[in-house]
Amino acid sequence: MTATAARAYRPALRPGVLLSPPLLRGPRTVHLVRHPVTGAAFEVGIKEHFLMARLDGTRNLDDLAPVYAERFGRRLGEEHWNRLLGLLGTRGLLVGAPDPAPPAPAPPRPHSFWRGTRPMVADAEATTARLHRTLRPLLHSAVQLPLLAAVFVLLGLLAWRSGALLDGTAELVGRPFALMGVALFLWASITLHELAHGIAAQHYGGHVAEIGLRWRFPAALLYCTVDNYLFLPGRRAKLVIAGAGAYLNMLLLLPFGVWWFLLSADAPERSPLAGVLVLGTIQALSNLVPLPPLDGYRMLGHAVGADHLAPETRTYLALRLRRAAGAEALAGYPVRARRIYTAYALGSAVLVLLLAAATITFVLHLLG
């Protein structure tokens, strides 16, 4: 394409190309771009995203140059324009551009008796879509807001009666069959937890790529992979998808909570019910802890608009510790990035100490 033709060219992104909201990644703010056919993804900077979002087939370089200059305070040069068109054309992201070669098939996942993963559903997208259609009336805010309020009430009541609940849970140590029943409920709760992610993704336009079984002997758990939720607009959808599992875990405890509070103090059912409530609450709330790979970690990343929060924090801290050697790299971090990574480092350290203390206290109470 000649320089004149490139200047007059009015490119359009092909339908279905996904552009993510801005994500903080290290010192840079990036946007993810995903091909609609191959699923290949890569990242671009703010300037490239600004231009790509305006490639609708009606604008050429002369049309975009003024708005680009107004936004970034510098003119859009022909070299930058041609480089962007070349990148998008090579990756098959423009209307009329050929599709790139399909990515090489993923190597078989290694698995053995001791550990591995295996897809369990032939069409995870269709399966979760059917579940979503069935449950859609229950997802209306008129239903969910009272349920959310009930969850908070339950948490308050559990905190109020924590002593009796912990004593009842401790009694399970001497009741192996009741303990097995509680463990079975918790396993089923984890399974439904994963399906909740998929149904929430369907509700907000996400795509469920896979539902399968992951095992680490002797445990085996269901997993549900949502592969495009980073591209969903706004924070709310991503936060709901990430938090849906823990929320469902708490919903499952509501009838057990009502049952426990209605029983007399000497009822034999109170001990296993206490175990369900205490261990189920720990299971749900622990998933909201903002440490990888838990759901709370993803939620925190969505809330602050940061990707790979933990590894990028480690990189930032390593540069801080190197001082003079890392000074040049540190200079590239904007103030917002410095604050986020510093706060996450300090908060994670405090959180780990608190969790360790809480775990020791809980175990000692059960054994005592």
Image (spheres, helix red, strand yellow):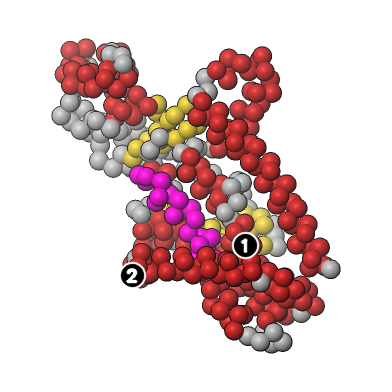
> Quadrant location of the N terminus?
top left
**Image check: 266 left or right of 30?**
right
- In the picture of the structure, the residue carrying the numbered disc 2 is 137
- Which residue shows up at 50% across the image and 24% down it? 334
Q: Position of residue 71 (x, y in %)?
A: 29, 22
Q: Residue furthest front?
A: 160
**Image check: 319 left or right of 108?**
right
- Stretch in magenta: 232-249
Q: Nearer the viewer, residue 222 or 297?
A: 297
Q: Nearer the viewer, residue 335 or 113?
A: 335
| CA separation in Å, label 1 and label 2 | 27 Å
Q: Going from the N terminus, do you reach mark 1 or mark 2 first?
A: 2
Crowd tier of the residue under label 2, counting other residues whose Cα lies within 10 Å: few below 14, some 14–19, many 20 or above: few
- Which residue shows up at 59% across the image and 59% down it? 285
Q: Amino acid at mark 1?
A: Gln
Answer whether labels 1 and 2 touch (C-beta < 8 Å): no
Q: Please identify the dominant SS of the magenta region.
A: helix
Q: Nearer the viewer, residue 276 or 144?
A: 144
Whether residue 195 is visible here, answered yes or no, is no
Q: Position of residue 160 (x, y in %)?
A: 64, 69
- In the picture of the structure, the residue carrying the numbered disc 1 is 283
Which corner quadrant of the image does residue 199 belong to? Answer: bottom left
> Quadrant location of the C terminus?
bottom right
